[in-house]
Amino acid sequence: MDESRTRLLDRLETGPARAETLASELDSSPTAIRGAIADLEAAGFEIERSGERFALRAIPTYGEAVAYGLDAPFTVDYHETIDSTNERGRTLAADGAADVVVLADRQTGGRGRRDRQWASPSGGVWLSVVLRPGLEPAEFPLLTLAAAISVARAAHESGVNAGIKWPNDVEVAGRKLAGILTESGATPGGERWVVVGVGVNANVDAAALPDDRPATSLAAERGTPIDRRVFTQRLLETFQAHRTEPTGVLPAWRTFATTLERRVRVRTPGGPIVGTAVDVTETGALVIRTDGGRETVTVGDCEHLRPVS
Ligand code: BT5
């Protein structure tokens, strides 16, 4: 949402006012104010007219309203239906955008890692954060971990006990609740960008999720839907805190990690590695103790194994 509309909403929250009053208070014109009010109504805000005065009656439950009351410097680019928020995020990033959150209610071509499909029915939280990070490319995986922490924390605040399986799965008792897809590239001018895609099964019926591996949703775990606007805001606020202070990422990640001290099998491009996950490095790689010594893995699919008895 653009800043003038946010300021108008903030003002209307304090009480009703005439267009002329709003214009003089917000350094605008009555015509521009009426235009902004029409835009807000189109985005689902309910604004009542009593005589000459405008009053804010109701805030939409999702969509553009995520920017309203958000304590993080992101603009929100909302789509009811989109192919993939990461695709749109990549286009915006290549055009030079930054600090934009592409958000959708439903995706028709949601993607997982390595071009796997990501089921994205209506009711989920499907978003991509477009960033120009002040990090070295080797540190970009920290953004994936930061996104996973943000989902896990927001899930806890919604009453769902979620943990993180290295590197990018947020799970509840082995059932996948959310996944992260981080992609990077450069603008034609050579500036590096990162798109952090986050998919959370929020108010999604578990029957609408793929059955090739166990999956769950926040609504299924709680037995009642969540407020997606508040959930998304908390998620983005935690993410913002971590990306501005990356030294806090690993300690926070460890508090949610379910992979450390577990027997794991990680499928890597160089073949499978089996052992006990003992740590993560400063850049988010997994350290595995194997029969042959320690191995450090930067990418791969991790499976938790039963302990050897
Ligand atoms: C991921 O891939 O977990 C990353 C998912 C990222 C999705 C977000 S949504 C917003 C943004 N826009 C996009 O287009 N993508 C991002 P991966 O680790 O490869 O896991 C993919 C596997 O998870 C699939 O092969 C299925 O087995 C399973 N899966 C697919 N959809 C799922 C869902 N909704 N919930 C749980 N598991 C799912």
Image (tube, rainbow, N blue to C red):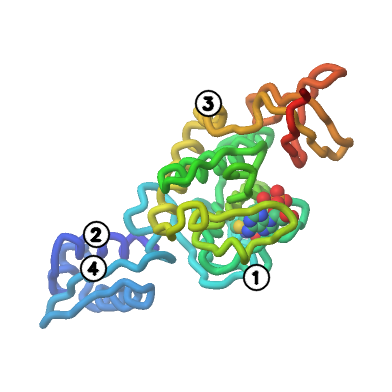
Callout 1 amino acid? Thr
Position of 296 with respect to 240 (left or right) is: right
Q: Nearer the viewer, residue 22 or 124?
A: 124
The tag earlier along the polypeptide, 2 or 1, is 2
Q: CA distance from mark 3 to mark 4?
A: 46 Å
Asked if marks 2 and 3 touch (Cβ < 8 Å), the reply is no
Q: Residue 108: give its label.
A: 1
Callout 2 amino acid? Asp
Q: CA distance from mark 2 to mark 4?
A: 15 Å
Q: Residue 251: give its label.
A: 3
Name the mark nearer the viewer: 2 or 3.
3
The residue positioned 52% from the left and 70% from the top of the image is 79
- Return the x and y of residue 74 as percentages of the image width and height: 44, 53
Position of 305 with respect to 86 (left or right) is: right
The residue positioned 77% from the left and 20% from the top of the image is 289
Callout 4 amino acid? Ser
Q: CA distance from mark 2 to mark 1?
A: 35 Å
- Return the x and y of residue 54 as percentages of the image width and height: 17, 74
Q: Residue 10: give its label.
A: 2
Name the mark nearer the viewer: 4 or 1.
1
The residue positioned 52% from the left and 52% from the top of the image is 98
Q: Nearer the viewer, residue 265 or 143?
A: 265
Please give the residue where the numbered disc 4 appears in the rendered image: 28
Can residue 159 be seen from the camera position used here?
A: yes
Callout 3 amino acid? Pro
Q: Is mark 3 within 8 Å of ligand 1?
A: no
The tag earlier along the polypeptide, 1 or 3, is 1
